[in-house]
Amino acid sequence: MTAPRARSTPSPLRSPDRSPDGPSHARASANRATRLDGLDLARGLAVLGMVVAHLGPPHPGFDWTRPESWSAVVDGRSAVLFALCAGVSLTLMTRSRPEGAPGAADLVVHRRRVLVRAVALFVLGSLLIALNTPVQVILPTYAGCFVATIPLLRARTRTVAAIAATALVIGPVCTAIGRSLLHDADDPIVHGVLLGAYPGIPWWGVVLVGLLVGRLPLRRTRLHLVLLAGGITAAVVGYGGGVLARAALGLPPGTASPSGSASAGSAGGSEPASGTTSGAGAVGGLPDAGPHLVPKGGGTLEHPGIDWAGLTSVQPHAGSTPEVLGALGVAVAVLALSLVVARPAGALLAPVRAVGALALTVYAAHIVVHAALDAVAGDRWHTEWRAALLVIVGAGLLATPWRRWLGAGPLERLVRRTSRSLDGPGPRSRPH
């Protein structure tokens, strides 16, 4: 009989968890192993979609024969995709470590990091709002959604699903009532987070759906196909249901209320056309206290004029259940397609993935560019595609080498360090 082969032991001259090419190669390999290329791709598409919506020409609605209206395709939907990816990232950053279930101290660290990250995003969002562009800044709503999600980071899946469904269905009703009752209030939390262009309750539902998606085995091809089918179904039910509901109520399909309010302009990228109002307001991140909130016929604190017809609208940023569900379905489908094509596409989509990895930096930069163009050229620049295309190309050209050689973007690095500023010894966040 031959003696059993002895189990090999790691050499004392080389750490078992270190790459033979050195510690920097080991860190890069670990980073590639923990990141999802498809998530970066989807996040990059979301950011570039918002660049198109904000810097592209203003449009009254989508029309294939009018290229200046093509930005309507991403109007509102890119922001929902951004929020969905944020929820997925929350799960990936706070999930249990491979070696075992987290203890109470581990959970406390993750909750504290999410809270500090939310504060950092709120401060950054407030600074961007101070630039006084017509762009509706989404970061304050993100911050509020992150704080509200902290108690649910490790909650049961069925509990999170029930709360997400409730937020998506009940949230728009609460927003409509709140906008009518509080339209004269000037509190930035109320208008910027709860009742603004990105109303907090329904958008929290979107983030929670992302939290649920993040719990799935996202590297499995079969799951990608299931997500794609589910996203298409949700989009058809949301948009189709809204159109059918408006038809049944005798309402025009393209307006948000009986007063004739319609969504005009790109997603916060331009002022509404004369006589209309964007569903979420147009200036400074505050909701419009005009006919969308108080329809013709009046409305007081005792007898508020609530835009019930707006709850069936499918216009971008309407904040209704049909619109949010339809946009969420599109977002899930885009995420599924991104997970499918990210690896096969390889270098072809590398610039978009790099933009997704530096999403916060690119998002903030495009608002700064918007403010600079407003200061230099007034409204003249906003009638053509030049600014949007230059920012898209520039973002890809700068983000690709930055991601390759320097890693996280400057704002991503700042937010991550801020979120760890109160840490003692404990688990490290995953770079998502």
Image (spheres, rainbow, N blue to C red):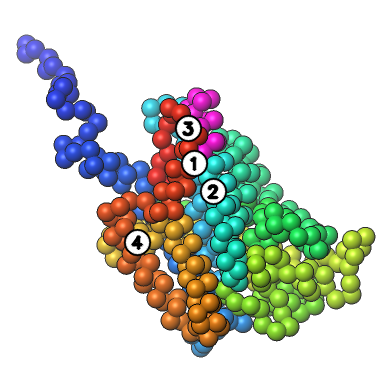
Q: Which residues are drawn in magenta?
A: 102-114
Give the distance between the C-alpha atoms of the residues marked 4 and 3, in whole angstroms: 29 Å
Q: Is residue 226 visible?
A: yes
Residue at the limit of the structure toward the bottom, as seen here: 65
Query: Which residue: 62% across, 54% down?
Result: 141
Magenta stretch contains residue 84: no
Q: Residue 419: which numbered mark, if any?
A: 1
Q: Residue 423: which numbered mark, if any?
A: 3
Query: Which residue: 82% across, 70% down?
Result: 294
Q: What kind of element bears circle 1?
A: helix
Q: Residue 399: which numbered mark, if any?
A: 4
Q: Earlier in the sequence, mark 4 or mark 3?
A: 4
What is the three-letter code of the residue carrying label 3?
Answer: Asp
Q: Nearer the viewer, mark 4 or mark 1?
A: 1
Q: Earlier in the sequence, mark 2 or mark 4?
A: 2
Q: What kind of element bears circle 3?
A: loop
What is the three-letter code of the residue carrying label 1?
Answer: Ser
Tag 1–tag 2 contact (CB < 8 Å): yes
Give the distance between the C-alpha atoms of the residues marked 4 and 1, in whole angstroms: 23 Å
Q: Position of residue 143 (x, y in %)?
A: 59, 50
